């Protein structure tokens, strides 16, 4: 039997791509005696997503990695150390042959534990520039003969020269349910006919206050051409009532791929999940990236890439006003040629099947290393 461990968590963006790789790897290894499991934070949201996908889940202590000192730094350091020893025990007991990391602060202790056991480590970065966890994990990867997968070709330049030699550009993994999504099913879910035009508003799995407020202020203009389907996040009871032209949902789960397929235009943040899932279905995007002191700027970089590629328009900072959002949305609604050009540029990026590329490398590695780490 070969055993593959996965790790990552904190947000859906650190879990869903990993699950996409896991599903593709299971498909490729069908007929072989193999087992997959996931190591994540015992307090994180990843447990629910992983177990719903049918994978075994092992929880470990997790401390947040910070570039600055706070009152939480010391207890977080102890959690990181505890996470290392807990992950090491799990990897050793479960006899893992390989470890694939999807990033997030919870992934660092398992990656370090794998290195200490001589287990080959692979990691993936979804954003244009690597986060702190990926920068640490990437250095660990080079000590085991693994690979650093990146979504963007330019990401390698943010990494040390020794790490760059281990980089493979793969794109960002997207769940197969998006690639096989059915627009008719999305319209049926909403009770809309084939002629209805849909604007899908996404703020990420947790919603986004700025996006919600922009939609609230511009709603009368946004519904001029579109039925607005809005994932509001935890602000579900925020006071803007549903109507025939406005459909708010606290969280869209199984139907998300189909609603995305049915959408003519996507308005949202520029987290990796939003932009790559939209690109997989060839959707033009209007992006309002998260920016400021609470972020390292990764969404701004993601949005910039998709805008330069012709797949998106970006409104950031003071430009992200209700009037400008309405102007941009209605401008695209009225310009079919521009929408089609943006859709083609989007699909060109999203056509890359990153799950297949990564799973192929992992499957080959299992033929090389499988059983040696036991």
Image (cartoon, rainbow, N blue to C red):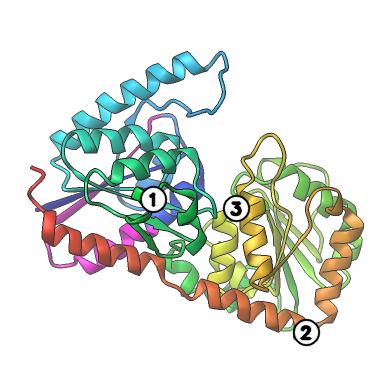
Q: Which quadrant holds residue 305?
A: bottom right
Question: Left or right of 37: which side holds 73?
Answer: right
Instruction: Look at the picture and state if 243 lies above or below 338.
Output: above
Please tell me whether mark 1 sits on a helix, a strand or a loop. helix
In the displayed structure, 41 sits above or below 179; it is above
Range shown magenta? 20-42
The residues tagged by marks 3 and 1 sit, at their Cα atoms, a distance apart of 27 Å
Task: Please give the residue where the numbered disc 2 appears in the rendered image.
Answer: 336
Residue 241 image point, x, y percent: 82, 51
Q: Is residue 173 visible?
A: yes
Task: Label 2: state its secondary structure.
Answer: helix
Q: Is residue 34 on the magenta stretch?
A: yes
- The residue at the point 63 percent across, 74 percent down is 262
Residue 21 location, quadrant: bottom left
Name the residue that disc number 3 marks.
271
Instruction: Tell me the element at label 3.
Output: loop
- Residue name at image x 66 percent, y 48 percent: 250
């Amino acid at each position: 039997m070969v055993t593959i461990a996965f790790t990552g968590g904190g947000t859906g963006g650190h879990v869903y791509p990993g699950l996409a790789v896991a599903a593709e790897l299971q498909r490729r290894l069908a007929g072989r005696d193999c087992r997959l499991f996931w190591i994540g934070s015992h307090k994180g949201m990843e447990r629910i997503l992983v177990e719903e996908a049918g994978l075994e889940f092992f929880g470990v202590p997790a401390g947040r990695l910070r570039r600055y000192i706070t009152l939480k730094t010391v207890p977080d350091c102890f959690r990181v150390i505890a996470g290392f020893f807990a992950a090491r025990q799990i990897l050793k007991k479960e006899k893992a042959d390989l470890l694939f990391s999807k990033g997030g602060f919870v992934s660092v202790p398992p990656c370090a534990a794998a290195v200490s056991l001589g287990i080959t480590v692979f990691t993936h970065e979804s954003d244009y520039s690597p986060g702190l966890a990926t920068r640490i994990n990437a250095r660990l990867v080079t000590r085991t003969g693994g690979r650093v997968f990146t979504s963007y070709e330019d990401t390698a330049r943010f990494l040390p020269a020794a790490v760059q030699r281990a980089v493979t550009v793969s794109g960002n993994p997207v769940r197969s349910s998006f690639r096989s999504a059915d627009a008719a099913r999305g319209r049926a879910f909403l009770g809309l006919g084939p002629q209805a035009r849909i604007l899908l508003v996404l703020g990420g799995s947790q919603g986004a206050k700025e996006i919600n407020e922009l939609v609230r202020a511009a709603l009368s203009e946004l519904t001029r051409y579109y039925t607005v389907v809005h994932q509001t996040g935890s602000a579900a009871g925020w006071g803007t009532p549903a109507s025939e032209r406005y459909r708010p949902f606290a969280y869209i789960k199984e139907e998300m791929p189909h609603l995305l397929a049915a959408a003519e235009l996507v308005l949202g943040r520029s987290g990796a999940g939003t932009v790559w899932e939209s690109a997989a279905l060839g959707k033009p995007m209007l992006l309002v990236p998260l920016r400021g002191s609470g972020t390292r700027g990764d969404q701004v970089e993601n949005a910039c890439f998709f805008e330069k590629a012709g797949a998106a328009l970006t409104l950031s900072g003071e430009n992200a006003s209700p009037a400008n959002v309405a102007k941009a949305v209605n401008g695209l609604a009225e310009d079919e040629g521009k929408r089609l050009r943006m859709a083609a540029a989007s699909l060109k990026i999203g056509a890359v099947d990153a799950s297949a590329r990564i799973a192929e490398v992992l499957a080959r590695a299992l033929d090389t290393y499988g059983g040696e780490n036991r």
